């Protein structure tokens, strides 16, 4: 008899805290790998009014949301190059008919993009970073240090979702009675929002929960917030990296 192959995330219950549209996609992918995925968006994306932009040598899109809310504002010149922070952002740019010229092969963060060999520009070249309000300043600071003229175009902002007591209580009751194996957090803001959205009971459950995060920075923020559970750090915030980190952890746990 051929042994039954168990999906890598079989029977693993995961609380997914991405914004609602991205949470739906990640939940579906996790379920395809056998997980029980529970969407609980801890951040919402709200558009920000911004003016059209043109005349740049390099335009960097810092996220999928930056593409969704900013691609239509870009007037690409004949020598303008487009950079995506990761493959998901590059896919969104392709759908927006603004294909990326530069995409990191791995890492999918500011550091990986800055290290890409094709990110080479002469002194005084003009760079535009399309992003959300309050994003990291690493790219802007690094490009400026290279002698480039850098501007940012904030096209969305992150806000904490409102939640009614009944929905929160239903989640926490399910968490307390049936358990949640892993909680995701793909940004520090998402983590802080989640803490604020939960009641004292929920925060006590979160404090000991296994947390899957997208960077060391988020892991450090979790520790600073007093969360004591196991910390799983993915290579990046994209869905494939998050699922991959979860699958590797699950495999090690089964083998132990």
Image: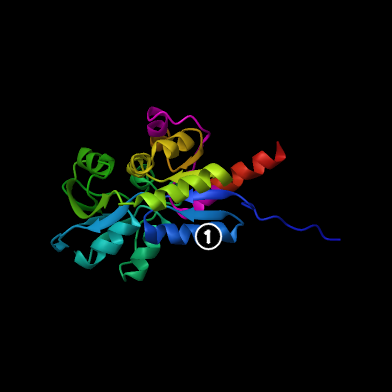
Q: Quadrant of residue 52?
A: bottom left
What crowding class fits label 1: few (fewer than 14 Cα within 10 Å), some (14-19), or many (20 or more)? some
From the viewer's perspective, is residue 195 above or below residue 226?
A: below
Image quarter (top left, top right, bottom left or bottom right) of the C terminus: top right
Whole-percent x, y for residue 2 in the image: 82, 60
From the viewer's perspective, is residue 23 above or below residue 210?
A: below
Find out whether residue 221 is within the magenta segment: yes
Please give the range of residues in magenta.
220-244
- Report if residue 41 is visible in the image: no
* Foreground pick, 246 / 115: 246
Question: In percent of the image, x 66 and y 55: which residue is there?
Answer: 7
Q: Quadrant of residue 89?
A: bottom left
Report the residue that reaches farthest toward the left. 51
Q: Circle 1 — which element?
A: helix
From the viewer's perspective, is residue 135 above or below residue 68?
A: above
Pointer 1: what residue? Answer: 29
* Foreground pick, 242 / 92: 242
Q: Quadrant of residue 223?
A: top left
Whole-percent x, y for residue 1 in the image: 86, 61
Question: In percent of the image, x 41 and y 33: which residue is there?
Answer: 222
Find out whether residue 21 is within the magenta segment: no
* Foreground pick, 26 / 192: 192
Question: In percent of the image, x 40 and y 64: which residue is there?
Answer: 91
Whole-percent x, y for residue 96 in the image: 32, 69
Question: In percent of the image, x 33 and y 40: which residue is there?
Answer: 196
Asked if residue 4 lies left or right of residue 176, the reply is: right
């Amino acid at each position: 008899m051929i042994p039954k192959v168990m999906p890598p995330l079989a029977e693993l219950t995961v609380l997914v805290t991405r914004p609602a549209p991205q949470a739906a996609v990640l939940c579906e992918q996790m379920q395809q790998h056998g997980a029980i995925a529970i969407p609980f968006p801890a951040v919402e994306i709200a558009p920000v009014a911004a003016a059209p932009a043109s005349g740049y040598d390099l335009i960097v899109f810092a996220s999928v949301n930056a593409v969704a809310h900013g691609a239509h504002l870009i007037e690409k010149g004949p020598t303008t190059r487009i950079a995506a922070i990761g493959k998901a952002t590059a896919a969104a740019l392709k759908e927006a008919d603004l294909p990326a010229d530069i995409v990191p092969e791995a890492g999918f963060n500011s550091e990986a993009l800055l290290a890409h060999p094709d990110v080479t520009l002469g002194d005084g070249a003009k760079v535009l970073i399309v992003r959300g309000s309050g994003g990291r300043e690493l790219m802007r600071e690094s490009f400026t240090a290279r002698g480039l003229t850098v501007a940012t175009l904030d096209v969305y902002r992150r806000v904490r979702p409102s939640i009614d007591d009944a929905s929160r209580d239903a989640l926490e009751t399910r968490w307390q009675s049936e358990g949640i194996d892993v909680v995701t957090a793909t940004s520090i803001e998402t983590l802080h929002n989640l803490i604020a959205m939960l009641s004292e009971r929920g925060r006590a459950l979160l404090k000991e929960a296994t947390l899957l995060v997208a960077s060391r920075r988020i892991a450090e923020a979790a520790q600073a917030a007093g969360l004591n559970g196991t910390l799983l750090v993915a290579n990046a915030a994209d869905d494939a990296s998050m699922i991959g980190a979860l699958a590797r952890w699950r495999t090690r746990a089964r083998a132990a």
